[in-house]
Image (cartoon, grey):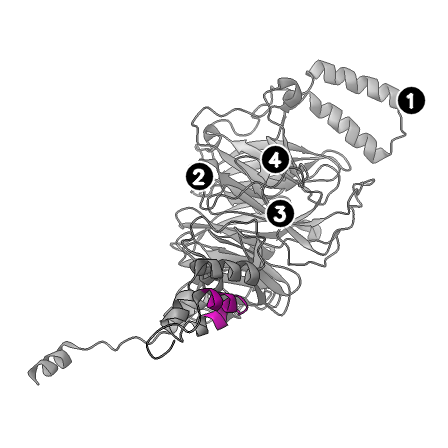
Amino acid sequence: MDEGGTPLLPDSLVYQIFLSLGPADVLAAGLVCRQWQAVSRDEFLWREQFYRYYQVARDVPRHPAAMSWYEEFQRLYDTVPCVEVQTLREHTDQVLHLSFSHSGYQFASCSKDCTVKAPAPRPGQAITTAAPAEQIWSNDLTISLLHSADMRPYNWSYTQFSQFNKDDSLLLASGVFLGPHNSSSGEIAVISLDSFALLSRVRNKPYDVFGCWLTETSLISGNLHRIGDITSCSVLWLNNAFQDVESENVNVVKRLFKIQNLNASTVRTVMVADCSRFDSPDLLLEAGDPATSPCRIFDLGSDNEEVVAGPAPAHAKEGLRHFLDRVLEGRAQPQLSERMLETKVAELLAQGHTKPPERSATGAKSKYLIFTTGCLTYSPHQIGIKQILPHQMTTAGPVLGEGRGSDAFFDALDHVIDIHGHIIGMGLSPDNRYLYVNSRAWPNGAVVADPMQPPPIAEEIDLLVFDLKTMREVRRALRAHRAYTPNDECFFIFLDVSRDFVASGAEDRHGYIWDRHYNICLARLRHEDVVNSVVFSPQEQELLLTASDDATIKAWRSPRTMRVLQAPRPRPRTFFSWLASQRR
């Protein structure tokens, strides 16, 4: 401006100059004069800066809750938990999993620790332990250890997963249990968070079922029964958390579902989604283009009874008899291997012995049981979804022997999501409407000829998103993270979802954070080894924890939070100092 305050350059020219600057330079230039300050806050300018800086596709609109492009740019820059503030080293081996309490005041960690350190606690001093242990932490400005439960006396090899119940009074912890002759299975322990007492223990097979809460006092576990060489049956049980202290006249366990497994597949990684929250999502994601995304979700609970229930038992038996006659006479084409024959016989047997999905009454508050499974090979490549109705959410009623008089001894699934790859992680959005899935894709056109030899898997991890209300895949896959473990040794990489962000671990020594609306990677969080688990605080998404094979847990906060915590605070004035100043 000249001495009289008249602009020397028109706003349009200043705007064009600012378009060639980066965001920091634009903000710095806005401090020069009032004209530049006004132009530096122009909405069109910040829209261009936003799309260019974050490399967002131009057809993606602004976040529905955003008031301006400037504020939206600032939100993504300033509220992502990417500043490392604390490193916890109490564990001495790989840290496998983290979980937050619903209040956000505590979190639990699971590890492969092999030693025990338990000094006597003093006021204000954290207890430092290491074991195959479940550790519970206090989330204050500085994180400290509250309790550690050593599970080695119960023949556990390590702990691998934990979950707080809805009112944060109980903690579910699952791990690998060493049985006779060094056989390994799983077990779930329920720990009171009031007294830190071990309330009950439940067998869980296979161990990577993990287990989960269905209600505040009941949890889901699994069991596996072998039927043939590659055929089995998974039974999912509902367990009372207090079964060791309940009266013997009260049922403490009840069978939920019995599911047939083909081609060496099993049910793993169970979780529960609350369907009542679907109509009020925190963030509504747009559906992907059906023309460009493959059809992955199959509705097995249609109203067509012929599709759901299959042929009647008599017809199924007749079909099985004809098939076996053709095999014995050498007329079956093509020639079947022993494993293919076993699978075919198991399919025919199940056709007339599978119970169709039950229909919920209008307005009934049902839940979805979600788990990984498969139909072609032992590596998990499908997601099964089974509706849990209100009358099934209690252990009351018949227990063992339930349904023995019925021919339908298998339960049909409501939906199946075919991932066409190895599933290595799942997580639900806070509103439970969206399911996020970490997977490593099979090659295009891959055919599984032998169920014991799954196809090779990609190093790049795809983070897929599915809408559980519409049963459709939404958006495109999120990418950036990688994994290197081969398909026959692949393990779980846990992810977590907050209101605006989704985070995941990876085998490339980093954790990753994406924005859920814009589908862009916002941060890479470094460790010295594989990052196994990430978790947001449910009350403050600007706090994230990561757990790694480097035996550490790291706490990350957003730049905005750090400025608030580090801002100098005025020294409080005592009453007497105030009184003395009034007398002057």
**Which label's residue is closer to the chain start, 2 or 3?**
2
User: Which residue is identified by label 3?
Assistant: 476
The part of the chain drawn in magenta is 12-26
* Distance CA(mark 3)–CA(mark 1): 47 Å
User: Which residue is identified by label 4?
Assistant: 235
In front of the other: label 2 or label 3?
Answer: 3
User: Which residue is identified by label 2?
Assistant: 277
* Distance CA(mark 1)–CA(mark 4): 36 Å
Q: Is residue 181 visible?
A: yes
Where does the image place residue 309, in percent across and percent down from the top left?
64, 21
Q: Is residue 492 above or below residue 270?
A: below
* Distance CA(mark 2)–CA(mark 1): 54 Å
Q: Is residue 388 above or below residue 285?
A: above
- Disc 4, SS: strand
For disc 2, the neighbor class at 10 Å (few under 14, some 14 to 19, many from 20) is some
Q: Amino acid at mark 4?
A: Val
Q: Amino acid at mark 3?
A: Arg
Image quadrant occupied by the C terminus: bottom left
36 in magenta: no
Q: Quadrant of residue 92?
A: bottom right
